[in-house]
Image (cartoon, rainbow, N blue to C red):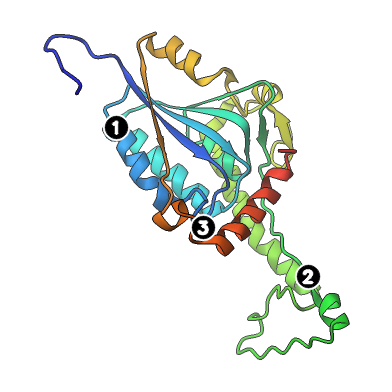
């Protein structure tokens, strides 16, 4: 039991929200619905600041936007500074989350960036033909079989996908520019989905400095600062491993995201 003594100044509190893994709506992914209670709790603690410990290869653009917007809304309402600490990687949606912070700190060897949009799937028409399997599709609406993985890829489908990606990419760029502003290096091509090491990211203005969470928080808020770890909780079924098939598919998808960065 913690005893509170009157007239004794309490040490500053900094909740640390762990944003680990791919971003999406699956049971294992980071999502706005799953993180909302964690983020709300962090800002209710009357903290000196909020820290984000980020290790994410990206994922859903919408969930990235929703999570980042929730963090910014609460930070602005309560006047609380937010610090992001990048571990191995904050790429694509992971960097979107990092930009919700007022300051982004990296390890010199972290990977940051990948400010772009990707659509990836598989195609099986030749395999099906070899196995004598015929794909039969009846639709009402010419776009209903859009990007069907069991049919040959159509040039018009590729163009439609690019038309969808354009506005999402524009929204990502606008978010980064709004959050990083004049800190971004002039003349640098930052929005072509390249990735950089943390040290290079600092030079380009994608991050503010090389620093690790504990020593940096102590340097900013005092040696007695109390760091309180918070994270998204898994659902009951996931905790007991009762969604084996879905968890296996999610693991494959997440593994593919991480592998793009050699992790």
Instruction: Please tell me which of labels 3 and 1 falls first in the chain.
Output: 3
User: Residue shown at 49%/13% (left/top)?
Assistant: 215
Secondary structure under tag 2 reads loop
- Residue identifier under label 1: 78
| Foreground of the two, 4 or 141 | 4
- Residue identifier under label 2: 123
Q: Position of residue 12 (x, y in %)?
A: 31, 17
**How far apart, in angstroms, are the residues tagged by discs 3 and 1?**
31 Å
Say few, some or many: other residues with alpha carbon within 10 Å of mark 1 (under 14 / 14 to 19 / 20 or more): few
Say few, some or many: other residues with alpha carbon within 10 Å of mark 3 (under 14 / 14 to 19 / 20 or more): few
Q: Position of residue 55 (x, y in %)?
A: 58, 36
Q: Is residue 176 left or right of residue 230?
A: right
Instruction: Please tell me which of labels 1 and 2 falls first in the chain.
Output: 1
Say few, some or many: other residues with alpha carbon within 10 Å of mark 2 (under 14 / 14 to 19 / 20 or more): some
User: Residue shown at 58%/64% (left/top)?
Assistant: 245
User: Residue shown at 15%/17% (left/top)?
Assistant: 4
Secondary structure under tag 3 reads loop
Secondary structure under tag 1 reads helix
| Foreground of the two, 173 or 218 | 218
- On screen, 10 above or below 253? above
**How far apart, in angstroms, are the residues tagged by discs 1 and 2?**
49 Å
Q: Residue furthest right?
A: 130
Q: Position of residue 179 (x, y in %)?
A: 51, 34
Which disc is residue 26 wearing? 3
């Amino acid at each position: 039991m913690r005893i509170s003594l009157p007239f004794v100044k309490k040490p500053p509190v900094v909740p640390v929200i762990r944003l680990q893994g791919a971003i999406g709506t699956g049971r294992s992914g980071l999502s706005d619905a799953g993180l909302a209670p964690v983020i709300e709790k962090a800002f209710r603690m009357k903290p000196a600041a909020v820290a984000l410990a980020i290790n994410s290869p990206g994922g859903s653009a919408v969930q990235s936007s929703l999570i980042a917007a929730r963090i910014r809304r609460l930070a602005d309402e309560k006047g609380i500074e937010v610090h992001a600490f990048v571990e191995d990687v904050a790429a694509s949606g992971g960097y979107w989350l990092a930009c919700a912070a007022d300051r982004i700190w990296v390890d010199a060897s972290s990977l940051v960036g990948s400010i772009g949009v990707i659509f990836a799937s598989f195609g099986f028409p030749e395999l099906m033909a070899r196995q004598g399997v015929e794909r039969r599709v009846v639709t009402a609406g010419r776009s209903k079989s859009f990007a069907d993985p069991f049919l040959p890829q159509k040039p018009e489908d590729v163009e439609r996908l690019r038309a969808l990606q354009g506005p999402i990419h524009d929204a990502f760029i606008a978010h980064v520019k709004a959050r990083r502003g004049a800190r971004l290096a002039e003349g640098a091509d930052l929005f072509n989905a390249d990735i950089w090491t943390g040290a290079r990211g600092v030079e380009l203005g994608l991050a503010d400095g090389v620093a690790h969470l504990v020593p940096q928080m102590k340097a900013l808020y005092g040696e007695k600062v109390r760091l309180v770890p918070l994270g998204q909780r898994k659902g009951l079924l996931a905790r007991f491993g009762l969604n084996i098939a879905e968890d296996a598919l999610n693991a494959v998808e997440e593994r593919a995201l991480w592998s793009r960065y050699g992790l």
